[in-house]
Every structure is written in C-alpha cells, then in structure tokens.
Amino acid sequence: MLHENDKRSALLLAAAVVLAALATAARAEIPDFTPEQMGGTLRRCFSAEPQNLNPITGKDLYERYVNDHVFQRLLQYNAETGELEGVLAKDWEVSDDGLTVTFHLQPDACFSDGHPVTAEDVVFSYRTVMDPEIDARSMASYLSKCDRCEAVDTHTVRFVWKEKYFKVADSAGNIFSILPKHLYQKHVDVDPEKAEAKGVTHFNDLVQDFIGSGPYVFESWETGRRITLVRNGKYWGKPRAYDRITFQIITEEQASVQAFLSGDLDYLPITQEWREKLLDHPERGKAFDIYVYSSPAGGYSYIGWNHAVYESVEKPDGTIERVEHPHPIFSDRRVRRAMTHLINRRALLKYLYYDIGGIRTGPFWSQSPQYPPGCEPWPYDRREAMRLLAEAGWKDRDGDGWLENQAGKRFVFEWTMPSGHQQTMDLARIIKEEFRRAGIDVQATFVDWPVFVRTLDTRDFDAVILAWGGSGALEADPYQIWHSDAIADQGHNFISLRNAEADRLIEAARSEMDFDRRMGLFHKFHRLLHDLQPYTFFIERKSLCLVHTRLKNVKVHKLGMDPEEWWIPPEKRLQPRRPVQGKMARTTPRHPAETDEGGAAR
Amino acid sequence: MTDGRTTRQTPQVTPGGEPLGPPRSYGSIVWGQLKKRPSAMASLGFIVLLALSAVLAPFIGGEVPIRWVEDGEASWPIFRHLTNGEYVAMAALLLGALLPITIRLVRPGAERIGAGPVLRALAISAAVLALVAGLLFGLREPERSYGFYLERADEAESAWFPLIAYPENPGYAQLEDKEQPPSWLGWLFPDACPPGSWDHPLGTGRIGDDIFIRILYGARTALTIGFVAVGISLAIGVLLGAVSGNFGGWVDLVLMRVAEVVMSIPRLILIIIMVTVIPQRWIPPIWTVVVVLGLTGWTGTYRLMRAELLRIRGEDYMTAARALGVRTGRLLVRHAIPNGLAPILVGATFGIAGAVFLEVTLAFLGLVQTPSWGMMLNDGRQHLEYWWVWGTSGVAIFLTVFAYNLLGEGIRDAVDPRLRI
Amino acid sequence: MRTYILKRLLLMVPTLVGITLLTYAIVRLAPGDPVGAMIRMQAGNVNPRVFEKEADRIRERLGLKDYNFWGEDPERIDAVEKILNAFYGYGRWVSHMARGDFGESMQKRTREGSKDPFDLYLERANVSVILNLIAEALIFLIAIPVGLMGARYHGRLFDRGSTVVLLGLWSVPQVLAGTLLLSLLARGGIGLEWFPYANLHGADPDAMGWGTWFVDTLWHATLPVACLVYGGLAYLAKLGRASLLENLRADYVRTARSKGLPESRVVYHHALRNSLLPMITTMVMMLPMLLGGSVVVERIFSLPGMGDLIVGAAMQRDLAVIMFGTLVYGTLTLVSLLLADILYAWADPRIRYD
C-alpha cells in the first residue's frame, strides 16, 4: 500500500504536474432528463484526500473533480466537437485586432444562494486570481499577458490582452471558476496578518463550503471518509440526473476495486494492471464495463534531459547569481537522440504498461490537429545509438566497460525520480540495466515528492522522469513548457531548452489567428522537437475506468467522458447492494454470492 | 596461578559416578551442550548455509560464466567480475572457517582453551582481513562491462554458467518472461502453466526478474543488516555496561538514565525520522537504518553486562586479583566478558532476528531502496495472485528469523545448568 | 514503599525531559525543510514570491521559526543559533503543553477540522485501543493454558512440539501474516472469502443498529486481531511455561506434594499463582504498544489507528504530532515499568525497595 502522500505523488505523476490541474474536463451535451430519470446517487472514489476544495488555490486533481460540479467558468470545451462553447457566457466575440474578448453572460445564471452571476463577479474572480497575495500561481501565469478585465455592464465583461494570442477566448473563459463576489470579497481583501484578529478567514485558508453556480452544492466533507455534494435546487441551467454525488476516499487500490465490485461505487478510474486482471472477470459486461479511451487529458510521460547546469556564483556585492552552462552530456543533440534509441519504448509499453497507450513522438497529442501526419517514433536501435554516441565523442576508451569522452570522464549521470510509484521503479531498473550494458552508468535517485518538486524548480538534476497532463482542449499552447522565457522564475521549462527556432515557431503560432497557418507552424514545431529530443517522449496515456452497468447514457466522446450526462434508472437506485460474484484470480472456481457487507440501505 | 587464570578444584566424578575428563572451560561446556541439541545445530547449519550462499551468490545465479572457452582460449570471467567487497566477504568466511586452526596455532598443545587464545586468534584474523581488504580496495577495480555471455553462449566451445543462468537485473529481453509461476509447475499442471523446465525454479517477478536470484542476493542484505546492526549494539552495550558496572556511582546513575531514555523512545519512529531526513545522496538509507538500529539496540546488552560486572565485583577472586595489581582491563577481558558472554550472545541472536523483522517493516513503509526480502514481500503483497513473489520471500524471512530464534533458544538452554543433557 | 514510588515518579520527570528533548532536537535540527516540503506537496509548482512568505507564516504559527540572535544578516542562521533555537522551541513547547496547548499538526485534520494533536490521537484512539485490548486479552487467555500444558507435560511430545510451533509463530513477520490472512481468508484473495478486506466498519456504520454494529465490528476486527495476537501469544506462552516450570521445581512445591496435596491443587492453586506474576508484568510492559505497536496491521487492513498516525507524522516531520506521540509513549513506558516493579514488590514480600 502506498502511503497517502506517495499516492498523491503517484497520481500527480500519473496525470499532471500543473496543467491538468488547471483545465476542466471537456463536457458533453446534457440531455433533457425526464422526471423519471432524475434521482439517485453517483458514487465516485478518490485515492487520496484533496488538500482543500478552494477553486482558486486548490492544486490537485481531486479538487478539480469536485469543483467541476460545483463551479462553472465562462466557457468550456464540448467533448464531442472539441469546440469552445459558452457556459456562464451566452456568447462572446473577439475583436478584429485579436486583443479584446467580450463575453455576454447568461441573463438567468445565478449562484446556489440565488444571487445572479454578474460581470462584477467575473471581474472579482479575475482580480482574485491575479492578486499576488492569493495562492493561485499557475492560473495567474496563464493570464500573464492579460492587461485588464473590466465590466462593461451588468452582463457584459471584457478582457483586454497585451498581445495577439490564438487562445485568447480560452484563456479568459476557461481558466478560472467564477466566484460570487458578495460572499468572498471580504476574505480576499483582509490582510493575512490581521485576519485572525479580525475573525475573518483569509481566502487562502478557506477550505470547504464554497458556493458556486454549478448544478451541485457542497454538502459535507467527512475527513478521511467522504465528500458529498447535493443537487443545487436553484440551478439556472438544465438539471442533471442525480440528486447526490459522493466521493469516497479509499487509499488502497485493491480496496477501491473491491468496493466497486461489491457494488459500493459506480465509477472508478483504474490502472492498466487492474484492467488486465479484470478482463476475464465473470461479471464484466454484466455488472460493469471497462472503458479505455484516448483523450487529450491523458497526457504523456517523458524522460527529461537537462540541457544546462547551474553554478551559484557569489558576486562582489554579496548576492548570489546562477550562471548557466551547457550540460556536459545532454546539451548535445546526438547524445539525446542516442538515449531515445536506447529505450525500447515498444517493449516497455507492451510489458510494463500492458499495451495500453501509444508512443509519444513530440509535444502534441496524436489525435490533435496540431500533430504532423506521418511522424514516426524513433525506433529502438542500439547500434545506431552507439554510433551517435561515438560521433559525439563517447567511446569505451580504456576497456573497462564504461563509455568515456575525450577528456576521459566517464558517462555517468543521475536520474531523479519521485518515489513511491511502482511502475517508475520498475522502469528505472530496466533502463538502468540496459544502459549499463551499453556502457552508461545511471544513478537512479528516488526522492520524496516535495524534494522532487524542489529539484525541478532549482534545475538540480541531470535527468528526470515526469508526466504532463493535457488540457481539456484539442489545441495546446506549448509556450509554458518549451519557450526559453519559461526557464527563469521557476517556469515549466525545467530542462532549460533554448532554441531560437523553437521560440520563433511558438511566438508565430501564438499570434497566428488563422487556423490552417497556425497548424502548419505547429507541425513544424512538433517535427523540430522530434528531431531535437529535448525529452525522450515516452508513453501517451489512455484513460481507463470501470463503470457500473446501472448507469445509463454512458458514452465516450472525442475528448473523454462526462459523468454529468449519465443517469440511473429508478429500479437501480439506493438499494442494498448485491456484491458482484466471483473473484479476481482466473484459475480458481467461483464461490456463491455473498451477502452484502453490512451497510444499511440509504 | 599467577597468570590470572582461575584454577578451580573440580571433582573427578559426576554425581552419577562417571569419571570426568580433564577440566574444561566454560566455553567448551556450552559448546558441548549445544552440539547435543539437534534444533540448535540445525539452525546453526542453516545460518552457515545461508551465509555461504550469500557470499558465493554469483556462482549460484547470474549471467557471468565461471569458465568460458572461446577460440581455443579458456578464461574465468567470474573472477574478474567479482567485486572487492565480495572477495573480502569470501576471505572473512575462509578465516572464520580456519579459526579453530588459528586458535591452536596461537596456543599450541593446549587442552583447555581459555578466553585469551580465542580473542588473540580473532584479533589475528581481523588483522589479516583488514590487510586483504586494504590491498584489494587499493589496487583492484573489478570489471564491469557487460560481457553478453548469455547472448553469445553458442559462440563458446564450452561455458560453465552458474546454476541459474539468468541476468541478475532484467533488461528488455527479460521482460517477456514476466510474472511466470515457478517453471517446474508446468510438469505438474501442463494445461494451466507454460511448459515445465528448470529455468525459473521460483518463478519470475513483475519485470522478468528471476525470484530465485533475488532471494539469493537478498540474503546479503538480510545478513548484513543483522550482523552489522547487532555488532554495533554489542560493542556499545558491552563497553558501556563494563564502564557502568565497574565504576558505579554517578557514572552508573547517568548511564542508567541514558539507557532508560533510549529504551523509551519508540525505535521505529526514530528510524523513520532519520531515514527520511538524511538524503539518499549522502548516505544510502540502508546504512542509516543499520546505524540507527545499532545505536538504539544496546540497552539489553548494557544491562546484562552491567549486572554481570556488579556480580563479580563482589567475588573474592576479583578482590584478590585486584589486590595483586591486575589491571581492570584484563579482568574485564578475562572474566567479565567470557562469563557474561552467553546471555549476551542469546540477546545478540534475538537481536539479529529483530533487525531482520524491522527491515521488513521499513520496506513495508516504503523506506528501503536496496533490493531485499522485505521489499519483495511488500511488492508481492499488492498482487496476491502472484503468490510465488511474496510466498518465497516470506518463507525466506521466516526461515532465517526462525533459525536465529532457535539458535538463541538453544544457546540459552545450553547455558542453563539445570537443563544439562 | 510510598517513598519509593514517589522517588520513581520524580525520577520519571528527568527521563521524560530527556526523551522529549532528544526527539524534539532530532526533528527540529535535522536537515531539510518540512514546512516547505508540505507546501510543495500541496502545490504543483511554487511561485517564489508567495512561497517564502507563506512558509514563514506557517513556521511562525507552528513555532518552527528560527530567530537570528546575533550577526547583521537576519536571514543567515548558523549552527549554534539553530541549536539555541531548538532549545528555545523546546521550552516553548513545554510551557504551551503545561497550559494544555499541544500545538498544531502541519497537515492532518480530524473529521471536525481540528488540528490539535490531542484530538487527532483521540479520534483514532478507539480503533487502536479496541484492537489492542482485545488482542491483549486474547493473548493472555490463550497463553496461560498453552503455557500451563507445556509445563505440565514437560519433555513430552506436546511440549516439544508446541515449543517449536510457538517459536515458529514468533518468527513470522506481521507483514507476511497479514498478507497470508488476507489472501487466504478475505475477499479479493485467492482462498476462502469469509472476511472483509479493509476497515473496521462496513460502508455505513452510523445507519446500523447497536447489535448489527457490534457484530459488524467484530467481523471486521477478526483478521487484524489475529494478526496482532499470534506474536505476543507465542512470547507469553513460552514465558508462562518457563515460569511455571521453575515454580514446579521449587522446594515449596515438593513440600506440597510430599504433604499429599492433590496434583491439581498443587499446580493450580500454588504454582500457577506464582508463575502468573512475570506474565502479568510482561503484559503491563506491553501497554505502550497500544500506541505504536500496530502500525503494520493498521496499514495492511486500512484501519485508521494511532500507530498509522505517528508513523505518518514521522515521515513528514510533523513536529506537534510526533512530540505528543512521544510524550504519551514515553509516559506509558515509564509508568508501565513502575507498575511492573510495584507488582513484583506487592506479590513477592522478599523484594524491598528502600
């Protein structure tokens, strides 16, 4: 069993460092539910507890999952078409110069306490995100090029940007949730030092009981056990089917799968390994279904090669400056390409990841229009790798089995990884051995998640393994990760990639408003990174989940699944659960059904 | 009589009327008793076997052949690849086996072996070991290149591979073999399992690593932890106990309080804090564990040593010896330690068992990174249907701990005069 | 006797101070930055502008802030200052504790939202206490007859066999035992599926009646208790056997026998009572284990107990929780030692502490 924090780190690794925590899931078209279809409880599960449910300062995925039901944004992505559509905004327009986005709010939109959603609330939310005292760092970075946000009238709000940007509507409308100003203004305004004295909790310290405009309202949070949401009686839009949504907290994966099979859960994301185990389960297709699908939110994992080393130099006036030098090993493109050739992604995908997922070739999702057609991944080719290394000066010069460069320095590097994640440890073992056979000494260092994050921030590594989650959208903006501006200030360009051509392509694409031309630029960019291999792009991940068959209208859209479009037939609701029969091992016979575990009917 | 050794007038017949042999030392009496107890000897044998297989592991399982003949040239690759540490361990084992001979060399022709020659022989062995270690580590660098011997096995005219010819660490090629049950099951259940063979007698793990090899090399970790941790706590406990018992007074008072404090701190918590705090770069966590185990485990030995010293302080022969001017150190070495040794040894064997246990707990908490049995148990635990992973490591741990416990019990019974066989 | 108890109680104080001071020093002075780590744990990425201020605020609130005593630069704190800060912090902890303020946990909250370590431990106390009390009771109840029979039939097959079996039981690590129990007896395993996989309760404990709740709890507790019992049982049974054997060989037993007393009276009335003493004192010494002894079992069976709490706190260097736990554990240990000594003195009039 993984410790709670390791579980969180595993999930963070598995899904995202920052980006996925930012984007909402794409949403489906909500059907018009008949009164008969309304009712019931959707029971979901978390593998660790969220730190808080604050929509602005919350940083983990769990907070996002909960607040997807409680809060709304101006815009969202349609899961089927992949296009932006309005939620709290009825419609919007972008000015000709591309610098202004104006949103017209839904006239009947209101918060769960009855107050209407106005432009003032939008402006307040924006200001809260941008407030330096508020702990909303990653969101704020997406709005860094926004000059201002102002209310034009009660239901019209305008965002003005400093530069042209192809995601100008997305960045304004789909980044932050809209908070009710009348409730939270005082929490934002209070001075954090004096907050306790005045008896007003500072916004950063608000943890639960938030009021939003979404179809569900926060009801309770039993620490360590369950978070419960109930239907928002005053919801302004189309009602959803369930009366309640509960999120149970079950840390151990075995236990959560057990709970699902016993009928205690309706929907459970799982790992590839569990899918493998449950493939032959007798109840599969009868009591539950396994869904495997690709979505931009799946993201990809990668091995990052640090292009730079930093030296702390004390200047004459006593301050410390960090001087950047090219990395002795990985600043050479040939070496990075050789690393990729030495990693047998196909075999690892097949055996370590149960063949669920694809091999990533570059920064963009394979089914996104940004992906250049015909881009093939570099194959596993040891001979080619050794040739490239030799070309870059790495040969076994003294016959001791290790590669050395011209200066006689051995090829040894430190690979830093977050601890507690089994798949990562397995991966590290195999790659370390294969590299050893090639003459490269890999020092695998596992560190705690907080230490790992620190290592990323200070760029104090040779190589790391990590993952990016996707946004909910078809088109991703590579600026945050790949532009040289994102190196300083602990930006996301951890590996310190400085490439003039990459920068140029990114800048050009960002301000290109014509779709086809922009795609052309992105294609070039993807191919460039494929050539440069700043990361060894690794596995493009698919999402896997179990869904109970009692849920109806379960669909997989182009951009994923949306639990809010499902419903529960009346006869399947709130009954004492009949546990799913059978066991998980494939070679032993079945046992008769057990009586249920002793929870009473609700 | 003047050399400090005590000479007692021993009866020439046992209470039953049988004639006694020449007077025997305490140590040989205990050893004789031990030899008559089958369970103790069995566990001792098991431990020796374990130590042997741990030290000689590369000869039993691995990818480097013992002998390799190619193009008419014969070579012995395994000896080039053995690390210096492995050579030192082999030397230690050899010196340990030769100890009886060394003792006789030191004190030729003696019927009775007292504590002095034994300690002297130990000191000599230790010195030789240190010399060997120094030479090896200073002059030799083991070969590390991957010889691709397994892949090229066809090219050799003759190749003597270890018993289980399989890489210690799996690569891509080994991934295919992942999660196989013990291969001989294929003969018993031809329908349910892949065809029977001796390739993987204990099955493979999640990434195609052979379980037998993992158990083999895991023995090293288990034994190292046990011996080093207990070694440290023995050293501290004996020293402090001797000081405390000998000097008494406020020294004793202070040390007793210190022992109480150390005993009252939850050991597991302390280890966890130290392990999580000391970064992996500075000290590998395994040594942190071992050192903390040693630093917190001495209180039992301390009390025993102290009790022993307090006891003999009152004895007349001690007063006499001291009046004669014999130095305190000599008294300690010749009398206190040998007499107190048996209960201390009992404590030590139980301590080794306890250290192995603790390692399992730490691996369970995810704080251990060196491959070990505890790690295997914890890994396998999460996939109950791959019973060979957690089953074999569990059995290995159980057998080792059981052996140490049996041995400890055996020594305790051997020392007890009322249980004389 | 009274003066002895008083003296021991007084001596407990410096020992407790030693324990808590040592623990505090280690946690406080160790390298690394637990507050920063906690913030990073919660954040994915840290904005340096807000981070330091936030971290400082939290440090001050938790009493972890290092103050600069000398030197011009308020940021630079050298090793000596760190040590002084540790002492100062310890003093602060003691004075707060005297008032009943145990500090605040860095990360954990109770169900009601309290961060007070006292509440945190209390919330989990019932799980740990229930489990360990049942376990200790069972250990005692089973060990006595087993030890008794072993001594009674000393040397015969039952005795020799049971000694080996008990020793074998004692040699099984709890991780293995728990895994075996789960795989063979619990749902989701590969054997029978009689018992649940995790937790102390089913899905809805509040909605059950008292009777159902009781049975349900027992059902859930069976495997964890079994896991806790087998080890202590082995130890205590062997102890009981050895103690009873010693008593049976004693002079007074020979006297009783030669007086013509029936064997059962000799054994049960005389020898047993005397041999119970070391067993009782050992059980008393097991008292501190109520707190931290069951962390493995708690984790394997997903039970929110005190052991899990303190181990988790140790891994994250959550000072307040660790200190409270150490205080309780240390006090329990010392008290149990004293109790054991008192019991010995009370039972055996030959022992005098003067």
Image (tube, coloured by chain):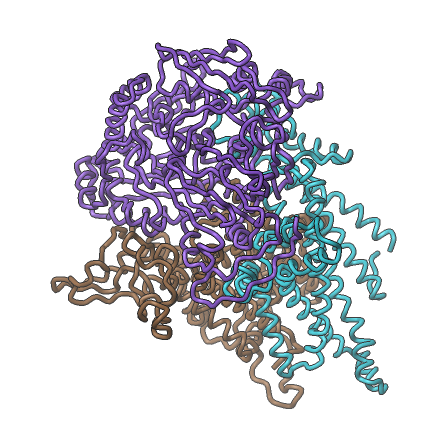
Chain colours: A purple, B brown, C cyan
Query: What is the total number of numbered labels drawn onto the structure image?
Result: 0
Instruction: Name the quadrant of the N terminus of chain B.
Output: bottom right
Q: Position of residue A384 (x, y in %)?
A: 18, 42
Determine which quarter of the picture holds residue A318: top left
Determine which quarter of the picture holds residue C171: bottom right
Determine which quarter of the picture holds residue A201: top right
Horizontal side of C268 relative to B398 (left or right) equals right
| Image: B12 above or below C280 | below
Q: Is residue B338 visible from the viewing direction of this image?
A: no
Nearer to the camera, A529 or C348 = A529
Nearer to the camera, B299 or B173 = B173
| Image: B142 above or below C349 | above
Nearer to the camera, A399 or A589 = A589
Horizontal side of A458 relative to B196 (left or right) equals right
Instruction: Name the quadrant of the C terminus of chain B.
Output: bottom right
Q: Residue at x 70, y 69 (%)?
A: C143
Furthest residue in direction left, as rendered? B71
Q: Position of residue A231 (x, y in %)?
A: 61, 34
Q: Position of residue B196 (x, y in %)?
A: 32, 71
Nearer to the camera, B235 or A51 = A51
Q: Is residue B306 visible from the viewing direction of this image?
A: yes
| Image: C213 above or below A251 | below
Furthest residue in direction bottom, as rendered? B17
Q: Residue at x 78, y 56 (%)?
A: C339
| Image: B79 above or below B28 | above
Q: Position of residue B59 (x, y in %)?
A: 32, 64
Furthest residue in direction right, as rendered? C2
